[in-house]
């Protein structure tokens, strides 16, 4: 029974850590499928996490909203991520800037701006106040009573269930709708899309906006489920792991889901290991670096075998189509 409980806890914690990666990697898929490389997911998650913490705090303390404040903060975080992503979209689509450099700038800008705003809003503190209300775990009736699987899969935060639903929705949108076809064509052969009279720039702006919105939700998930506040290291590399999830999943929503579960498991393993006394002989630094080390190893293994969209990162010039 103890073994089953430990295994159930491991799966449940894996889902908690994987949720933010699922949201953010789905956003990355939208952007990169359109041909726009987005290494700024880390910064967009940071903006989402910050917005969720600040809006949640003021909604709960100043307005006195109850549980609804958590959902409203979650939505506002997504909108903030979407708006912030427009900086990247304008830079690379309108002004044809280097997409990698623009994404790096987004990461630095988000980190610096959010830390400054936290100090400004919370009297010099580097951390927002702890939220009094965050997402509670919910149980699916009947299914949550199934031995092992009930606790592992059917007792979770609502954001986890939402992320799993979005995997199916995004797959359907990408591969079974006209918008998805045009989006994928924009990333493979933008000249053909433009020749057909389809507004390529509108599609790419929309794709980057969706990437920011979903990455913002990913960042908000961390704030509203596990940390309950925001500080400069709340995200701490999750955006870069989400990039690895997207690549490892070969720009496919279900592939990203599997990859997110893998990386979520590596983080859960680190958390579980610290519970056992025999793990005291292992330096905590090695445990903390486990997810990032696995990220590097996975990327080494998939580089050359994962084929990105053909036009990704390339500046589109209509005169040369």
Image: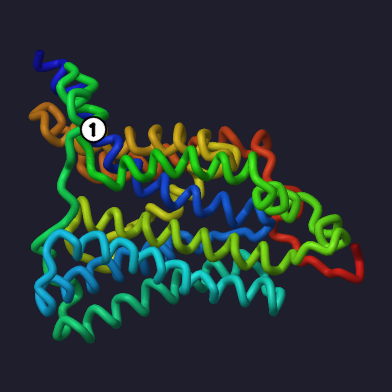
Query: Which residue is located at x 38 percent, y 55 percent?
Result: 237
Please, which residue is most extreme toward the top here?
Answer: 1
The foreground one among 155 and 317 is 155
- Which residue matches tag 1? 12
**At x 66% / y 52%, what residue is drawn?**
179
Residue 62 picture location, percent across and down: 11, 79
State the image coordinates of residue 120 (x, y, percent, origin top left).
23, 86
Q: Is residue 234 left or right of residue 111?
A: left
- Residue at x 26% of width, y 66% of height: 73
State how the image is colored. Answer: rainbow
* Quarter occupied by the N terminus: top left
Q: Is 210 displayed left or right of 313 in the figure?
A: left
Image quadrant assignment for residue 304: top right
Name the spot of residue 280 as percent of width and height, x first: 12, 34
How many residues crowd around disc 1 within 10 Å: few (fewer than 14), some, or many (20 or more)? Answer: many
On the image, the x and y values in percent for residue 135 come to 19, 52
Q: Secondary structure at mark 1?
A: helix
């Amino acid at each position: 029974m103890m073994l089953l409980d430990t295994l159930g806890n491991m799966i449940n914690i894996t889902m908690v850590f994987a949720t933010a990666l699922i949201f953010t990697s789905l956003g990355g898929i939208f952007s990169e499928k359109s041909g726009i490389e987005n290494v700024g997911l880390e910064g967009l998650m940071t903006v989402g996490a910050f917005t969720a913490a600040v809006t949640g705090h003021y909604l709960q303390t100043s307005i006195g909203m109850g549980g609804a404040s958590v959902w409203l903060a979650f939505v506002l975080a997504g909108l903030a991520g979407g708006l912030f992503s427009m900086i990247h979209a304008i830079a690379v689509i309108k002004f044809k800037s280097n997409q990698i450099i623009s994404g790096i700038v987004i990461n630095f800008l988000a980190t610096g701006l959010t830390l400054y705003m936290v100090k400004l809003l919370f009297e010099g503190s580097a951390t927002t106040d702890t939220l009094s209300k965050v997402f509670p775990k919910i149980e699916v009736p009947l299914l949550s009573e199934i031995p092992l699987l009930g606790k592992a899969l059917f007792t979770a935060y609502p954001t986890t269930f939402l992320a799993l639903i979005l995997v199916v929705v995004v797959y359907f949108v990408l591969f079974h709708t006209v918008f998805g076809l045009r989006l994928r064509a924009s990333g493979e052969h933008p000249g053909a899309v433009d020749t057909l009279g389809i507004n390529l720039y509108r599609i790419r702006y929309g794709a980057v906006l969706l990437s920011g919105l979903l990455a913002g939700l990913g960042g908000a998930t961390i704030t509203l489920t596990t940390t309950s506040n925001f500080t400069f290291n709340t995200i701490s590399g999750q955006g870069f792991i989400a990039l690895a999830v997207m690549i490892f999943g070969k720009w496919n929503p279900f592939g990203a889901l599997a990859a997110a579960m893998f990386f979520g498991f590596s983080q859960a393993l680190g958390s579980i290991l610290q519970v056992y006394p025999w793990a005291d002989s292992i330096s905590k630094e090695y445990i903390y670096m486990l997810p990032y080390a696995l990220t590097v190893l996975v990327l080494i293994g998939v580089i050359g075998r994962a084929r990105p969209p053909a036009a990704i990162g390339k500046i589109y010039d209509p005169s040369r189509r």
